[in-house]
Image (cartoon, rainbow, N blue to C red):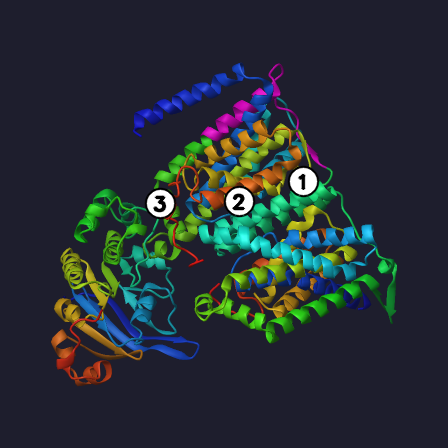
Amino acid sequence: MNRLVILLLTAVAAVLVAVLPMLVGPYYIRVLQIFFFSAGLGVAWNILGGYAGYWSFGHTVSIGIGAFTAAWLGMIFGAGSGPWSMVLPVIAGALLSGLFALVIAYPLLRLRGTYFAIAMLGVSQVVAELVNNVSIFQGGIGVFLPSPVPSGMPVERFYYYIFAVVLSLLLLISWWVKRSRFGYALLAIREDEDTAMMLGVPTERYKMAAFVLSAVMVGLLGAIYGYSLGYFTTYSVFRLDWSLNMIVFCLIGGIGTLMGPVIGAALILFLTQVLLGGFLDLHLMITGALVVAVILIMPGGILRTRWRLPGRKPARGGAE
Amino acid sequence: MTLFLQTTLNGLMLGGIYALAAVGFSLIFGVIGIVNLTHGVFVIAGAYLALLFYTELGLDPLLSMLPVGALLFAVGWVYQRTIIDWAISRASVEASLVVTFGMAMILRNLLQLWFGPDVQTITPFYSFFSISLGPFRVDMVRLVALGSSMVLLLGLTLLLARTHFGRAMRAVAQQPLAAALSGLNVKRIHAMTFGVSAALAGASGAIIGIVQPFSAASEVAWTLNAFMVVVLGGVGSPAGALVGGLLLGLINSYTAQYFGPALTQAAMFLVLVLMLLLRPTGLLGNPYGESR
Amino acid sequence: MSEILLSGRGVTKKFRGLTAIDDVSFDIPHGAIYGLIGPNGAGKSTLFNLITGYHPLTSGSITFRGKVLGNMPIYRRNQLGLARAFQIAKPFPALTLAENVRVGAMFGRPGDKNVERTTQEALDVTGIAHLAQRRAGELTVGDLRKLEIARAVATRPVLLLADEPCAGLNPTETEEMVRCLRAVRDAGTTVWLVEHDMKAVTNICDRIIVIDAGKKLAEGTPHEVVNNKEVIAAYLGTPAADLPAHTP
């Protein structure tokens, strides 16, 4: 695709996103709002997992830190109202999430593959437990955030626009990363970390940068999500299924690609919210089943799949 | 001093259970090289099954370890022959990990639908007994739990050391290709390993059911516990699981006593990260070589 | 050939009591093609690993461009101008050849450089420019070797350590590789290579260092080395006339 086509498509998408709330009902606006949020999570996870090859199984920890930081700030300094009142807490949520990542990055990024993935799972469990059980964090009883929605505006429309803007911002960052020196370093790290070092890539520094950037992005989304909930407890934001979802979006759409997470999120949310919206009890199962199916059927994701032809299976694992 | 010793005693008893709950996870990691994130679900499923046997048939949880183990053996076998085998022949290591993560979600959801989200416990008649040994107090259930764990771990040790299956399993772990070339049915041994692992997880679940409250959501904690036990003790051997389990139990017990129960997970995890950084092969190392 | 680029003094490496490299000293001057030969297990790759920083030294010191390397991180050594091509090619399989090489050109030795031009030059000098858009995972052994050299060259090294660049290549490919290494040298990069193929070594190298069982045995021109009695006894174990012409 050439530049003009992409530019044109982007413009059309922007106009569509802007006018869509005038055309569809509140339920679908809410679904779209969740879609933007979810796609944003996927895009953020993809920076670390897709570009750098460090699969985190505990990224939900950044959602939690972002949301709770915003709420704590509101409680300490007193919350204003109106859309501008959320700017500072949201930025603080993103930054604290990044700071936390910076602190744990040094030991955790020494681990590779499976060990890193599970260590992150552990981090998310431990932080959730601390937020829940240590009373000053108030995760057990829950925290409030005042509504920043301007009077007269429907709530779902407000968050729809905010999440749309944030998703665009995250996509822009991801696009920039992918085509920059930073992105090349991450790809080299993913492909072969030792060789990357041998080619003069300061791998430690870049891994850490990707980890922190990814955490800041998720923290940002988490803080806004906290506002959209208004009241939440530990386990409404430290949710294990989200850690899985971020991976799933990328896997389905195409891991390491720019738009893969967005496409994956669109597909999953269409399935779970629109087609199976009534089966709330089964969401965990549906997501799980999708992951398993996708990995078994098209390991490269939609954007990367060369459809498997019979007899062209990669030779692995030996004869039957 | 008495308090310290009592805490130590509690930690060791808890550790025995950790060891049993983790040994299957360790076996799969050591023999097949897969981190099975479904492991915690097997543990919790064992607890639920034991609960079912107890409430419906009045079967004592310790006795129900047998049928529970047998059922889960079948589940583990089938699971390996289908999903796991498909995943490792098609996807990367990380992707296989995601498959087990996804399966854990599915199974957890199933358990929730079936048994409800509430926290459960199994309370046989000896639940409220305790023995006094001088100044120390030992809960009957914990003692029984520890005893059964030791018996099962010993049984597994003998299985690995003395039987044809045990030797075959060690051969497959060390040299899969050579083992296959010398006529061992590697697929069958992988399936057996999964079966044994799930059976032990289920049995440990039956014991955990009488010692601690559980719910479908606690499966993650048991998977993570198993991972920590393996990192502390080393991969693939009952002895390693025992060392790791006891250590984890002690850390848990001391932290709960001296720093507060809210911090136990954090403390256990801190030790895990330190261990991974300082001695990645665990205290007893990996008997199957260091390549994993 | 006057300025000393890389020098080692009393370089020693012990692995759990086993001495892999024992008190080896060397001086590699600017502008030459040096050879490093020795029987299997003599410690050739270990010596390269010590120079590039994969293992710390047990004792001794290595100096590169006037700087003591000590425990300088691997990537810093490359940025200083030390590149390494591995014996077993380690491509970035999901990336194209051009992208593989571009990583080297983007990082590597800093200085004012045009990434695209450096990439193109490295592809040209190794003769794989026509494959630039193919994925590295799809290449043959011979092309992978060239990619390995191209990527190292793209970091604009002052010294290139090449670990058996001709291993597994057929005679035609070996010929091409020799031509390629000469071109790299002519462009101003000093080359030090480990090689089994005696014909290639004697053909291309200005000077050769011989090690055996971790110890330095001899150093000299190919002619001197091949006729050195100790070398013949320890390394070849056969008269010089029976030198293997080509070891696959």
Left or right of A22 on screen, residue A229: right
Is A242 drawn above or below residue B42 in the view shown? above
User: Where's the N terminus of chain A, which quadrant?
Assistant: top left
Chain identifier of the residue bearing label 3 in the image:
A
B43 or A197: which is nearer to us? B43
Amino acid carrying label 3: it is: Tyr
User: Residue C69's mark?
Assistant: none
Between the residue at mark 1 and the residue at mark 2, the CA separation in whole angstroms equals 28 Å
Chain identifier of the residue bearing label 2 in the image:
A
Amino acid carrying label 1: it is: Thr
Q: Which residues are magenta?
A: A142-168
Mark with earlier residue (1, 2):
1
Q: Which residue is mark 2?
A: A292
Left or right of A102 on screen, residue C73: left
Amino acid carrying label 2: it is: Val
User: Where's the C terminus of chain A, which quadrant?
Assistant: bottom left
The answer, for residue A215, to whether it is visible in the render is no
Q: Residue at x 68, y 70 (%)?
A: B155
To the question of a shared chain for discs 2 and 3, the answer is: yes
